């Protein structure tokens, strides 16, 4: 029995402005029509595996749930980390969850924000790892390097585990090298990139963790002992988990255990750690440009150009990344994209919101987009999914006008219920208790015009909320 | 008596996406708080002059009128060209208009889309030209070259008109030179850039035009003989003016007349013919960047960055122009900006509208911005100036919801009149005859939500329009 454990806790800023704190890389459609999280699950198609356990931050829970629902893999299987404690505790939570369900599956630990282009080779590596993990080994997948990368840690292989199976003992984990060292690693043929993917029995991992870092295991056991599923989520006890030491599985277990083995893999892997690495793995036109959306080019080569809305035009442009979103544009030299984090720091220091949130905001019931605002008013486009309902709420400082432009709304104002359909409108006075629901089978789209002296998101009194937010 | 004649007929695409066919360069605020048209008038401050005559295309008439009104220079003084016929006929229309009013002023012909940084030197040149024009000379202003420009025509000077006044006869007009020739021109000290600015008596210009191109004069006389002022506009007869030959004042008169003199001027002149020339004349930060709007930079030098809405961030960027508008972003190498016209051609060929119109559209009564749209609906932010009124109208295919968010509206629906103020709304059914007016003293802002099967701007039946559009 194979249980994928998908680590979806990243909050990377390296792909800003597309990735934001509330919408990090793993939830974006960076390669094709599915998000990276969804692609991580779908890449396993063809193998036999259980419904994956997904581990993510509490603030991303509704996005993760919606994305798993879309691919039919949502089944009380999202573990919410109240705080980040690195990979050793996160994997322990998953292993304990599996054991509590009375089973001892093989855990296949995957990152939700990596790309693997060759699924067949990936599946072959999993098959090799399965044999080893069933024999109580802790398997790490080593990526066969294709360049002298200085941005990754490396694994030096030891002796072959058998003459035929092309797996090796782990001789050494090494930190990110300098360029000369990386070049030597590449030429030696004995080093692999440390991908952060693993396979082992839940019980074996927990036993090793108990041996080397018993305090981490104890904290995780305390954090998960009394939790009950809440909607789609497995909520971890915040106080107990906060007391856990933060450490990576590499340091806590893999470097210490005698059971570590490495399975080499050459499957077109990338951690998509920057706009330039995304350019490298994306399909390009004849001028070596990647272009997504409404892009017009003249005499431009080797660029990555993304137009979310409206058009982007380039003239005489080379080796540049242009990312246009609804509220922010990034233009960066392709060999300087690692400095995007400097812009994110500037935005934080300036008290802006563009590093944190998109103009379009996801909610468990759907989403809204702030399409216009000014003194004493704001206009939102609100989308409610079929069958979903916003909380029963009241505002102290604003009145609202709702105009339905698609679908049907069930609106309750001070206990008076009515159905509104396309081209109908309703007015919600200041102080009125109101709720909005989509009782239909198609999305509900409405325009909300807010009017009042204070229009902050925090002017909301929730009386009842089906998503546990009241 | 000095009568400025301001040529505002350009439809340049070289500053796209800020300039569009419906909003060309002369109407933009490219340098400071006033538009280029307004700056052209205000640059004359300190001289004695009549209310300027402004010549522009019919489709720009409301923009020109609004901009002149803002600086208190609107007084039935906008000549509308029904078709473009180049400068010789346009100046003839202005000269004939002046003569018809019973006067023979000195015409000071200026382009509405040039920058002159040193007003004092400009005024001194005008003073010199005034003496010469009063003596029946045709004066052209020659810009003392500061570089070997290949993008301008040149004027070779002849003999000095007097030992003291630093004006010269015109020896020759020459076409745009190659780089080597331009270098020779620059070094010789005998050549000036042809600025397209002139001064002469109206009667003298008309007399010279009659001598060299009598058919142009005749066509212009026919085109303007029967026109009456219409609102703020002097409308030229379309049929008669269309029959006129197109020609420049240089070819038609200046190269032929014996009365041409050139007054040299070194006043920080620029025709702002490209994004790079705008960068050159704009004030820069220590890293030689020009930045307007919410711009965040890291390790970036020698750029022109304009953020109309939202933020623009640059990382490791050099010598690049980034222009962000509500519906289009341009990223261009600064030494390739002349190729922006290629993008404009691509947009035309693709049947787009972004070369023609901005998302924000100006109307005589104010403006609107299309802030959201989808299947069967569209949302507009409408701004109506105090005292202004939209046409009485009706739509066959759409209903409209109006929500006032600022100011007061007088709304008439099927002859029922009502006043709406902030936070009030009204519904206009399909087929209802309706009108909207701002009876107040502050701008009226409202959100319009359109709903229907067809939402094109042409679904409008106008019953009455105070701006002559019904």
Image (cartoon, coloured by chain):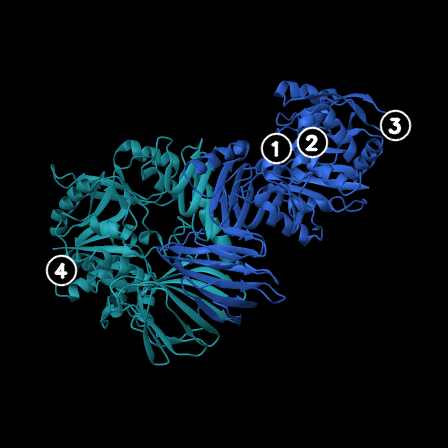
Chain colours: A blue, B cyan
User: Is B252 left, or right, of B431 in this rendering?
Assistant: left
For the residues bearing labels 2 and 1, Cβ distance under 8 angstroms: no
Provide the secondary structure element on which disc 4 rests.
loop
Callouts 4 and 3 in the same chain:
no
Residue at image point 52% right, 51% down? A361
Give the residue furthest to the right.
A163
Q: Residue A164 carries which label?
A: 3
Chain label for disc 4: B
- Residue occupying image coordinates x 31% and y 49%: B29
Distance, label 2 to label 4, CA atoms, is 85 Å
Q: Where is residue A176 in the image (x, y as percent from the top left)?
A: 63, 23
| Front-lying residue, A357 or B461 | A357
Is A341 drawn above or below residue A251 in the view shown?
below
Q: Name the residue under label 4.
A: B104
Foreground residue, A192 or B315?
A192
Instruction: Please name which of the two marks, 3 or 1, marks the residue nearer to the observer.
Output: 1
* Separation of residues labelled 2 and 3 (CA atoms): 23 Å
SS at mark 2? strand
* Image-quadrant location for residue A287: top right
Residue A376, image x, y percentages: 36, 57
- Residue B356's image quarter? bottom left
Up-down: is A122 above or below A178? below
Q: Disc 4 versus disc 3: distance between alpha carbons?
A: 104 Å
Image spot of residue A10 (x, y percent):
60, 38
* Residue highlighted by disc 1: A85
Q: Kindly identify the residue that appears in the image at 67 percent across and 27 percent down.
A: A215
Location of mark 2 (residue): A195
**Residue drawn at x 21%, y 62% as measured from the top left:** B77
């Amino acid at each position: 029995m194979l249980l994928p454990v998908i680590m979806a806790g990243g909050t990377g800023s390296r792909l800003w402005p597309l990735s934001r704190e509330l919408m990090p890389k793993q939830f974006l459609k960076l390669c094709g029509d599915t998000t990276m999280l969804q692609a991580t699950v779908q890449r396993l198609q063809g193998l036999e595996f259980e419904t994956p356990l997904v581990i993510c931050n509490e603030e991303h829970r509704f996005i993760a749930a919606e994305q798993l629902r879309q691919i039919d893999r949502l089944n009380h299987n999202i573990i919410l980390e109240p705080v980040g404690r690195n990979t050793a505790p996160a994997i322990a939570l998953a292993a304990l969850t599996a054991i509590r369900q009375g089973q001892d599956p093989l855990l296949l630990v995957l990152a939700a924000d990596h790309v693997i282009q060759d699924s067949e080779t990936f599946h072959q590596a999993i098959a090799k790892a399965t044999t080893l993990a069933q024999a109580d080994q802790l398997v790490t997948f080593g990526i066969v390097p294709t360049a002298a990368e200085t941005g990754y840690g490396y694994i030096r292989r030891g002796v072959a585990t058998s003459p035929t199976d092309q797996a090796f003992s782990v001789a050494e984990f090494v930190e990110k090298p300098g360029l000369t060292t990386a070049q030597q690693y590449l030429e030696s043929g004995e080093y692999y990139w440390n991908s952060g993917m693993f396979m082992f029995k839940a019980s074996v991992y927990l036993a090793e963790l108990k041996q080397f870092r018993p305090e981490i295991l104890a904290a995780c056991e305390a954090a998960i002992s009394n939790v009950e599923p809440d909607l789609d989520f497995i909520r971890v006890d915040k106080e107990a988990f906060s007391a856990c030491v933060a450490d990576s599985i590499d340091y806590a277990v893999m470097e210490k255990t005698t059971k570590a083995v490495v399975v080499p893999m050459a499957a077109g892997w990338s951690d998509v750690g920057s706009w330039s690495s995304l350019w490298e793995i994306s399909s390009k036109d004849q001028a070596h440009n990647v272009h997504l959306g409404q892009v017009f080019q003249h005499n431009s080569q080797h660029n990555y150009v993304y137009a979310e809305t409206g058009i982007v035009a380039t003239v005489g442009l080379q080796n540049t990344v242009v990312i246009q979103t609804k509220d922010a544009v990034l233009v960066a030299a392709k060999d300087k994209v690692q400095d995007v984090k400097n812009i994110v720091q500037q935005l934080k220091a300036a008290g802006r919101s563009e590093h944190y949130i998109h103009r379009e905001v996801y909610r468990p019931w759907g989403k809204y987009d702030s399409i216009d605002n000014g003194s004493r008013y704001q206009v939102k486009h609100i989308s409610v999914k079929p069958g979903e309902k916003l909380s029963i709420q009241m505002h102290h400082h604003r009145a609202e006008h709702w105009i339905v432009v698609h679908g049907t709304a069930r609106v309750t104002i001070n206990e008076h219920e009515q159905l509104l359909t396309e081209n109908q409108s309703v007015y919600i006075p200041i102080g009125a208790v109101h709720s909005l629901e989509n009782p239909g089978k198609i999305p509900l789209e409405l325009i909300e015009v807010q009017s009042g002296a204070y229009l902050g998101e925090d002017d909301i009194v929730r009386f009842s909320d089906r998503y546990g937010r009241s």
